[in-house]
Image (cartoon, rainbow, N blue to C red):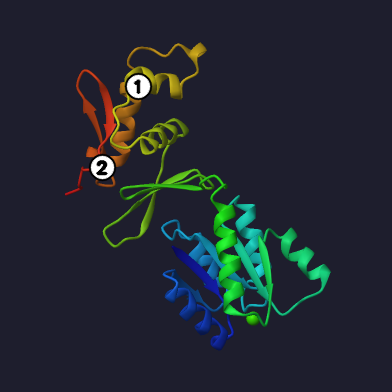
Amino acid sequence: MRVLLVEDELDLGAAIERVLSREKYIVDWVQDGTSAWDYLDNPTTQYILAIVDWMLPGLSGIELCQRLRARRSPLPVLILTARDSIEDRVVGLDAGADDYLVKPFGMAELLARLRALQRRSTQVPASQLQVSNLLLDYGKSEVFVQDEAGNPQAIPLTAKEFQLLEYFMKHPNQILTRDQIENRLWDLQAEPTSNVVAAQIRLLRRKLAKYNCEGLIETVYGLGYRLNLTYAPE
Ligand code: CA
């Protein structure tokens, strides 16, 4: 349960970090809006929610919210602020914040709000799909692979290759027949030629090979294809 905490008041930030760590959250604490965006923009950081102070050096908490929502990120955001007028609340909620906590507050209330946000966010469709060392980001329509240093690299995929890889990532370790793939990726009117699936898989494997992942999608002879999670790059 990884949480991003953005708070420039050092005492308050440290206190929140301590309480959340005790509750078994993994906390990334940053103290300005620009670093916060770097963390949020990194496709390998998978936060379940963000706690964001309104007034921050760099980008404000409101600007962070707006950027997230512009990208259609469903990440739940709790705004912390000393502001307490109705207008301010409206600005915060309009910017895409999910909840709003006025300073000073008790840690018990913060924890209760976080639990409520988590309960609500389970109904939000996933924005990302992670399988093995691949991360599919729906907001960016890109698939990233982690290199040896742990940094995400975007794999340049065509729309069809993206759809094909998504289909495999949604069904890891499961054999998908040629017909299943064909029906899924091509509309029925298109009447694809008999080897179009094989050709598309060949193209996708060629892309994956550049990232040391060519064995990830294996042929199961006579049956179809499978994304093999036990495959380990050399
Ligand atoms: Ca502040």
Reply above or below: 61 against 73.
below
Q: Residue 197 carries which label?
A: 1
User: Is 66 on the left-hand or right-hand side of 51?
Assistant: right
Question: Where residue 65 sits in the image (x, y, percent)?
Answer: 64, 62
- What residue type is disc 2 on? Leu
Q: Nearer the viewer, mark 1 or mark 2?
A: 2
The disc label shown at residue 169, or none:
none
In the rendered image, the vertical position of residue 45 relative to residue 178, given as above or below: below
- Residue 175 is situated, as x and y percent measured from the top left of the image, at 29, 27
Q: Does the residue labelled 1 lie within 8 Å of ligand 1?
A: no
Mark 1 or mark 2, which has the lower sequence index?
1
Q: In this view, does 73 lie to the left or right of 60?
A: left
Residue 77 image point, x, y percent = 61, 63
Q: Quadrant of residue 113?
A: bottom right
Q: Is 112 or 162 nearer to us in this picture?
A: 112
| Mark 1 Cα-neighbour bin, 10 Å: few <14, some 14–19, many ≥20 | many
* Residue at the (78%, 76%) spot, across then down: 84
Q: Mark 2 points at which residue?
A: 229
Q: Where is residue 135 in the image (x, y as percent from the top left)?
A: 39, 49
Q: Report helix, strand or loop for mark 1.
A: helix
**Can residue 60 be seen here?**
no
**Label 2 crowd bin: few (<14), some (14–19), many (20+), radius 10 Å:** some
Left or right of residue 31: residue 183: left
For ligand 1, the image quadrant comes to bottom right
Label count reads 2
- Relative to the observer, which residue lies in front, 220 or 32? 220
What amino acid type should be assigned to the residue bearing mark 1? Val
Q: Is residue 46 above or below residue 228?
A: below
